[in-house]
Image (cartoon, coloured by chain):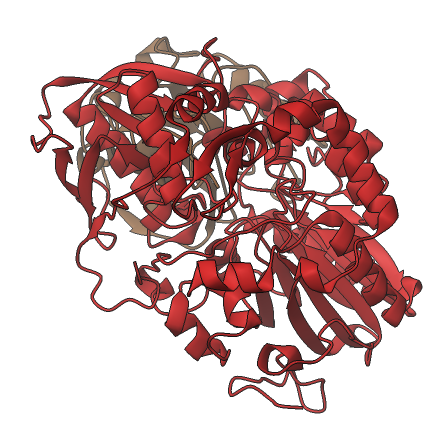
Chain colours: A red, B brown
Amino acid sequence: MKLSRRSLLASAGALPFTMPAAYAAAADMYDVPLHADARIIHITDTHAQANPVQFREPSVNIGVGAASGRPPHLVGEAFLKYFDIPAGGPAAHAFTFLDFERAAHKYGPMGGFAHLKTLIDRLRNQAGASRTLLLDGGDLTQGSGVANLSGGQDMIALANILGTDVLTGHWEFTYGEDGLAKLIAAFNGKFIAQNVFLTDDAAFANKPAFDAASGHVFAPFTIREMGGYQIGVIGQAFPYVPIAHPGRFVPDWTFGIHPDTMQKSVNDLRNNHKVDAVVLLSHNGMDTDLALAAQVSGIDIIMGGHTHDAVPIPQIVKNPGGKTFVTNAGSAGKFVAVLDLSLAKGALKGLQYRLLPVYANEIKPDPVMAAEITKWRAPHQAMLEEKLADVETLQYRRGNFTGTMDQMICDALLQEMDAEIVLSPGFRWGNTVLAGGPMTMEDLLSETAMTYGDVYVSMMTGAQIKAAMEDVCDNLFNPDPFYQQGGDMVRVGGMNYACAPNEKIGNRISEMTLSNGQVLDAAKTYKVAGWASVSQPQNTPPVWDVVAKYLRDKKTVRITKPNVTKVIGIGKNAGYAP
Amino acid sequence: MQNTKTTVRIKSGPALTRRITLSGAAAATLAALLAPGFKAAHADTAAPMADASAYPAKAFAQKSKDEAIAALFNMTATASDQITFDAPDIAENGAVVPVSISTTLPGVTAIAVLALGNPFTLAAAYQLPDGTNAAISSRIKLAKTTDVVALVQAGGKLYSVTKNVKVTLGGCGG
């Protein structure tokens, strides 16, 4: 077996890290016999993509400070070089944006729960069900029209068929405390989160909690026996739910990273429950996980999500207790992570990690799952399949500053809301739509569907607009990952600007110039449109209805001049290839 | 009393949370905490809880770290790693930011919280009766992203620990 240049030994005599052979050569990459004691399968951030999708990985994913030039802040050629992935093949297509359209036609769509079911069943059968655990890192239940209409229940039904054992959350919380309770009630597995607590007021009012003494709303961890060994799995929900989303959804709960209570859970698992390995199922985002791993001792591996980084090889972080492996497993159902553990009593001996791209064309869809997907979609089929426009240029979202999909959404709001400037949230979910086909309502909903998607119009001074942009930019480029929130930069319509990621808040945004060439005036008031406000409900139409009207009228989607934000002062950065 | 395990967490004012754990003689400590004569004050409750004459009005009027520390303690602080200071990395609501301070330092007589970015620097100050295990919890209002300083006076010396708390507009998370 060909070992990567960066192959690593977990310890003497342990299983080596290997790149799956199929990254380099044609082989059955999904044939993965277990040569260890236990197998953990991990998916994350599928964002309710029940059917296979196209998803273009970013060409701009800049790392600042210590994160510069290291995973996950590598794109394109730098990514291929770092991970020894040959150019032009299926793996290069899965992991990078390079030659996206040609490769997308050649290799077809990726993911899809019927395909995931077939693949995960095979991986489970090869290891044996009693030695296998299936973890979902959250953002399972949001990101499609069907999920939004069902309160996420469709995806819980699919997860139950998939056999998901453990789940933590992020957008799950945007269905509200009651909505999440209903999802958990329907879920056959266990929902865990060590970093969600009752507020003092809620505790005083005796609101329900897993543990009234500690204030934990959910079980912080779960323990599973696998192959005669005890595996502890700790859950870490997205730490900034009431900040990144409307606080009204979670009035009784308080979040945060909480390395202190994390350490307590690890110690409890190791000292009292005598587990043989500790896994953290995390929705922190990769930079935050890397920082957390340096602070907390005793976690063997962090299986991460949130930032949608598909990182083929675990990163090793040293800490006072030894070392912790940190992974991130991409998004949209494109990847399945397979972690095989070699265990001894009380200790991890070795591990092998594979991040398998899910090429839908290579996998026979599971008929039971396919029928369930059809069942949930059927009541809305006519609405979802409406063709809104013909797509003439590639439409994608992911990237630190801009994407053609968001440029289209900004153009739509400029026109439909009669605004001078548009601010559109920099989400990392949202599919890619190829040129030459239709843009359907289902496609548009994959970019916009959420529980607070109303549009708004607001009068803002130039100074207020700059302050808002500086605020979001600091959530992206603060050199301390604990102060980041894991989204991309707010998308801007009607205006261009320059960004200096290495500067401090207040000094990153400059050269703010309206589309008509005028420089933004700090004192002047502008009409600004946007959507997904975190303040009170707007009682206005949802953004998808506004954009759908624009597309129906326009009949074609064509971005003739992709909006490129000027980036200042990053030099040659491995995360920048616009 | 030294070995009595006592955690007293109070919100602004005398409302007590479920997290209060009292054992043994600590109940007497709580009584002392709320009794007239204890020199407690809080920025959000402008009227002092007890002895009006003890309200450190001058300290609460200061607009810089050094001036507030000088007015309250008349000494300078040195950094300490024996103070546990819990405050969020990013505030969920800048108007009510929970902070908790505890320490293993012996002989604690006072604890205070400074918010350096606020118009008035001193946010809360407590005096602790002899024998109280030093642990306070409060909520402070932050005008903007700022360093928050926890001060502990123990054995006649002043110690500090600083944490940056970010106050953000929110939105746009992943």
Residue B57 placement (x, y as % from top left): 25, 17
**Looking at the image, which is closer to me, A578 or A218?**
A578
Q: Is residue A319 visible?
A: no
Q: Is residue B125 visible?
A: yes
Decide: is A395 above or below A545.
Answer: below
What quarter of the picture does the N terminus of chain A occupy?
bottom right
Residue at the spot x=81%, y=64% of the render?
A275
* Left or right: where A321 falls relative to A545: right
Q: Quadrant of residue A168?
A: top right
Residue A47 placement (x, y as % from top left): 61, 42
Residue at the spot x=51%, y=43% of the render?
A437
* Left or right: where A430 falls relative to B2: left
**Looking at the image, which is closer to me, A240 or B47?**
A240
Q: Quadrant of residue A233?
A: bottom right
Q: Quadrant of residue A377?
A: top right
Residue at the spot x=46%, y=77% of the render?
A87
Residue at the spot x=45%, y=46% of the render?
A486
What quarter of the picture does the C terminus of chain A occupy?
bottom left
Residue B97 placement (x, y as % from top left): 44, 28
Residue A330 placement (x, y as % from top left): 57, 56
* Left or right: where A307 falls relative to A382: left
Decide: is A400 above or below B13.
Answer: below
Decide: is A512 above or below B29.
Answer: below
Count the numbered circles shown.
0
